Image (tube, rainbow, N blue to C red):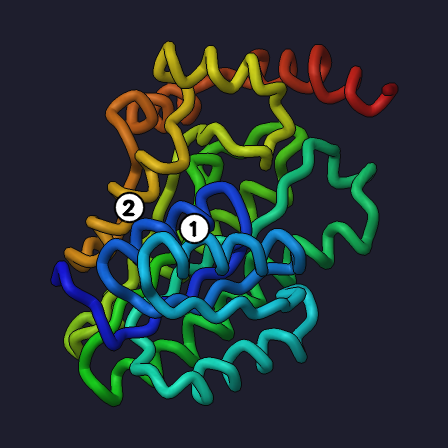
Amino acid sequence: MTNLRGKLAVVTGASGGIGLWFCRVLAEYGCAIMMVSNQREELVNAAAEIKEKYGVNTIPFYADLTDRDDVVNVLNAIDKSHYDPYILINNAGIFSFRTVAETSPAKIDCFIRLHIDAVTVLSREFARRCVARKEGRIMNMSSMSCWMPMPGIAMYSATKAYIRAFTRALHYELIDSGVTATAACPGGIATDLFGLPENLKKLAVRIGALDTPERFARKAVKQMLRGRKQYINGWLNRLAIFTVGIMPTSVRLMVKHRLLDRNIKV
């Protein structure tokens, strides 16, 4: 489908980075977009920008998806939007580079609530609404790190692994209904998630180590609309999955000793 006018797309983490590019790409398809974020000012500005540029209806919805009540509020807002919900993109996420022992209980709870609880509840409820009409697309943002149990990213990679496994199984459960679920597993993307300086991000994009948010969003949306069960951007990232999988323990310990331990001391 290339014309999605009259359909509603719901995008979480929509006020910046990949999430904002998802919204821009979907606006080109004519979707009305419910943009969900916990960054109130950025959200309002982003929604106004897309509405003016693409001429589609945007619904900025402030929500903290680590709060279960706010997850329910998002679902209620979908039902009150007077649009047929067609696309859900669970993009909201967090990242930290710390050992589990050095990660606060509040941060661990945040990982679980945002990457597991919110994704599960929103996917389930959105799917139930779409199955009734026999059409719909869900895309959940996993990560290449779901194959990479490296020191320092235990909570990130473990919760992203849940998203991939959950979404793949959901895809098979839904496929006969006309609804599909896609697990997007990006490699490095030049956003602010990992805290890289701008000059390093630009260099990484030039040498192909990082993808741009726009390029990734466009390709991922196409794969989602085609009903693919999984999308990994680029052959280099596919090769990296294999390479990291056979990486000896000594290399993983080098990451711990030279990067992680130094980061903790700082």
> Which SS class for mark 2?
helix
Q: Nearer the viewer, residue 47 or 266?
A: 47
Of labels 1 and 2, the one closer to you: 2
For disc 1, the marked residue is 141
Q: Could you tell me residue 101's position as x and y percent?
A: 81, 39
The quarter of the rendered structure image containing the C terminus is top right
Residue type (three-letter) at the residue carrying disc 2? Ala
For disc 2, the marked residue is 220
Disc 1: CA contacts within 10 A as few (<14), some (14-19) or many (>=20): many
Residue drawn at 49 percent across, 59 percent down? 47
Residue 14 vertical placement versus 220 (above, below): below
The mark found on residue 95 in the picture is: none
Quarter occupied by residue 253: top right
Residue 68 vertical placement versus 46 (above, below): below
Task: Answer with left or right where residue 4 lies relative to residue 96.
Answer: left
The quarter of the rendered structure image containing the N terminus is bottom left
Q: Nearer the viewer, residue 223 or 33?
A: 33
Residue type (three-letter) at the residue carrying disc 1? Met
